[in-house]
Amino acid sequence: MSEKMFSEEQLEQLRSYPEIAGDELIRHFTPTAADVAFVDPGKGRGPVDRLGMLVQLCTLPWLGFVPDDVTAAPAAAVARVAERLGVTPAALRLYGKRDQTRSDHLGLIAKYLEWQTAPAGSQAMKELEQFLLDRAMEHEPPTLLFNLAREYLMAAKVIRPGVLILAKMVGTARKAASDLTSQLVGHLLTAEVRADLERMLVVDAGLGMTRLEWLVSPARDASSTSVKTAIDKLTWLRAIDAHQMDVSVLPNERRRFLAQVARRSTNQGLERRKERKFPILLAFVAQAAVDQLDEVVALFDQAVSARESRASPRRTRRWSSGPRRVRPGNW
């Protein structure tokens, strides 16, 4: 999952310090007096540990996690923190030679800033799983879900898990959303409905295309032919009771997403989805039944308006070329 979502280069970027903007530098790397006191040398800490701790302290609210290589923090950020402490920025190069030191310091910082970790099986991790499932019912792109998860964790003041762990959770949430979708609309997918949906992917000899292609083909104009075609589509949709298919058990965003997948997919692409194609097609025809009625009305109105517009000049010409009426009293 993670390999498909991100390239190795992207994974490395997500694990590391990014470039820092000027407003972020001021906002996150301006330690308060309390922050400086927290890393006070009176607690047995030398300049190296004090600088390393304060860089971590400023990094956590900025990124939502602290990269393993704290010494790779942006030079401008390090310089700003070092100046506040009155130590040389070069001291950071000696920080964290032992992974345990950096880890212990991060634990103290998290407690000080009132952040929490999210180990496997923790309440924080369960809440993150539920959040991802809820968002996956609304959105499909994995990178979007990953970024939403990062924002959620930062808002909840939970330290972001590793990139691979979070990417795997996104993949799990997407699959769970697909399974839940199938469960929620399962009662609508009777044998008859399934057969109707299957036939949508078979080329119709009379149309010269599949019913799905026919339904997604937009009207080119408001001609009588287009109006008739629109009515034919509506009639076909009503014949399979598409207007009675209640998919309101799904979130609005999920319904729109599934319908859009049907519109953009090829017949072969949908066939490869096997059982998962049925909720997609179901959401599509349910939405199409509504949209098609609107299209029929709109096309009819446009056709009538166009006909009246063409007739108006003729009426004007007949009126202007007729005999002039003279009112009594104008002699």
Image (cartoon, rainbow, N blue to C red):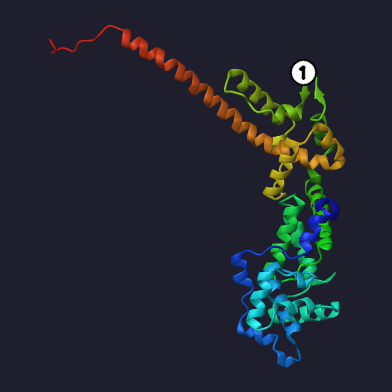
Residue 3 horizontal/vertical position (percent): 85, 53
Q: Nearer the viewer, residue 223 or 168?
A: 168
Asked whether 255 or 163 is in front, the reply is: 163
What is the quadrant of the C terminus in the image?
Answer: top left
Which residue is drawn at the image coordinates 63% and 85% (left, top)? Answer: 34
Residue shown at 77% from the left, 65% from the top: 16
Q: Is residue 269 above or below residue 110?
A: above
**Residue 170 seen in render:** no
Q: Position of residue 75 (x, y in %)?
A: 69, 70
Q: Residue furthest top?
A: 323
Which residue is painted at 67% across and 68% down in the image?
155
Tell me the quarter of the picture where residue 27 sits: bottom right
The type of residue carrying mark 1 is Gly
Residue 92 appears in which quarter of the rendering?
A: bottom right
Label 1 sits on a secondary structure element that is loop
Q: Is residue 160 above or below residue 170?
A: below
Residue 148 on image: x %, y %: 71, 59
Q: Does 280 sit above or below residue 107? A: above
- For the question of whether residue 309 can be seen, the reply is yes
Residue 263 percent across, percent down from the top left: 72, 35
Q: Is residue 24 left or right of residue 191?
A: left
Given residues 12 and 85, the one toward you in this image is 85
Q: How many marks?
A: 1
How many residues crowd mark 1 within 10 Å: few (<14), some (14–19), many (20+)? few
* Above or below 179: residue 286: above
**In the displayed structure, does residue 218 sit left or right of residue 117?**
left
Q: Residue shown at 81%/47% (left/top)?
A: 182
Residue placed under numbered mark 1 in the picture: 206
